[in-house]
Image: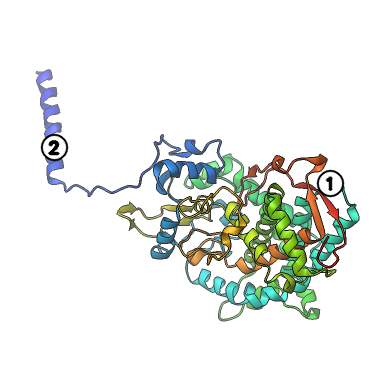
Amino acid sequence: MEAISVIGFAIAVVLFFLFKSLITPSKPKKNLLPEPWRIPIIGHMHHLIGTIPHRGLMELARKHGPLMHLQLGEVSTIVVSSPRWAKEILTTHDITFAYRPETLTGEIIVYHNTDIVFAPYGDYWRQLRKICTLELLNTKKVKSFQSLREEECWSLVNEIKASGSGKPIDLSKCISQLITRIISRATFGKGIKEERVFKEIVRETIRLTGGFDIADIFPSKKFLHHLTGQRAKLTKIHNKQDKVIDSIISDRIQSRSSSSQETLLDVLLRHKDEAEFGLTSDNVKAVIFDMFGAGTDTSSVVIEWAISELIRCPRVMEKLQAKLREAVKGKERIEEEDIQDLMYLKYVIKETFRLHPPLPLLVPRECREPCVINGYDIANKTKLLVNVFAINRDPEYWKDPESFIPERFENSPINIMGSEYEYLPFGGGRRMCPGASMGLANIELPLANLLYYFNWKLPNGGSHDELDMTELFGAVVQRKNKLVLVPTFQDIVDGSS
């Protein structure tokens, strides 16, 4: 009897679920993006172990398509690796993907996401961007800092000359210090006492936020943020940073009445507590961190990569130096007007940005509502990664994409954003970097000075093809090893060296 009861119960259960399946309307099957094979908990993270993320994602895209899905821990992510899909998403679906995912870095370092980079899409972000584009980073404001750029570049030239011709120098360090001084003076009005400390804070933040941080791929597992020590490390950095910025602001408030030039900090302080759109003290500090952090390392690494590529390509180096010395016509000091029409310099910088975008993966975005892209269903809160590194090397748009060929930009309409989104050094859409003009100005003149006054070679007679080009991934992709070169200086007379 017991056996019969058990069988009867089992039959009843089967009939119940069968009946339920017949009367319950089935959910429409979603059309999902292609993806690699995954494993529980970590999803697709194992495919990226041991890779530099932008290169690893490019290889996955070649296998699974330029629009693919990855599950990175808890976070559903789509990865865009072609101009076609970058254009589609950053135009047609730009508002849908205008949000930023919440990150531990944004919460702690930039005062609860109140900077321009991490701020959520909305009224606050729109007002902040308006201040940036109309007052902080417009062409007139960038032009106003011309004299300080010229002064700092001339100072670096004299420092290198004083070190002695024919002796190796750490050019990475020289470039970093130069850009830091330029940004410090433009932002704060003068070089800051805590410059070295502030720079170390920025570098440590970049190091900690490179790659796929465990706190951001498992956002709901708060205990992991403490267990890994990431929250404690970022909090410690933030406390140092807060003291430094407070000191800088206090000094500037006391001295700005005697200053004839309005700095970037002055602009922010002018908007602080105003009736129409008042910025709080923390808002000002968050934007200041953006100006200093984003402005210094992005510009300096582009100059480093440009000189690295020129060392590896003597033909381009010789051509650029000849055109530069012809344009400047033997002047003792270079002024920005001397190089504003030097197109080959601009081509070299464009080609450097193409091969070495400082942010190869744009700052992540987040989908704010379900949408359909090319028939594929994209869920709300899906994270978006745009792989600019892969886009800038797409062989459908770029001939011989791995080679350094500045001439490819001759007679080309491509500017800082290609019409087909094949070139995105500063991103695209609403969240495009507003500091492009400032960034380019801080690259052109320093690069011109380093190439006008000096010839460069590798130490110990090394061959140009021996230069190590290994990348170090972080929030900004730098050279893994310092760029150590030997300068040879000669007075420039009548455009020749």
**Which kind of residue does numbered mark 1 sit on?**
Pro
Within-10-Å neighbours for mark 2: few <14, some 14–19, many 20+: few
Task: For the C terminus, give its image quadrant.
Answer: bottom right
Q: CA distance from mark 1 to mark 2?
A: 79 Å
Residue 218 visible? The answer is: no
Residue 489: image x %, image y %? 86, 56
Residue linked to disc 2: 18
Within-10-Å neighbours for mark 1: few <14, some 14–19, many 20+: some
In the rendered structure, are the residues bearing label 1 and label 2 in contact, judged by CB atoms less than 8 Å apart?
no
Of badges 1 and 2, nearer the viewer stands 1
**What colouring method underlies this structural image?**
rainbow
**Which kind of residue does numbered mark 2 sit on?**
Leu
Task: For the N terminus, give its image quadrant.
Answer: top left
Residue at 73%, 52% (x, y): give it.
Answer: 200
Residue 268: image x %, image y %? 65, 73
Residue 266, above or below 119: below
Residue 408: image x %, image y %? 57, 58
Residue at 60%, 59% (x, y): give it.
Answer: 407
**Of residues 177 and 350, the one drawn nearer to the viewer in this rendering:** 350
* Residue 42 figure quarter: top left
Residue linked to disc 1: 168
Residue 100, above or below 464: below
* Residue 142 figure quarter: bottom right
Residue 142 visible? The answer is: yes
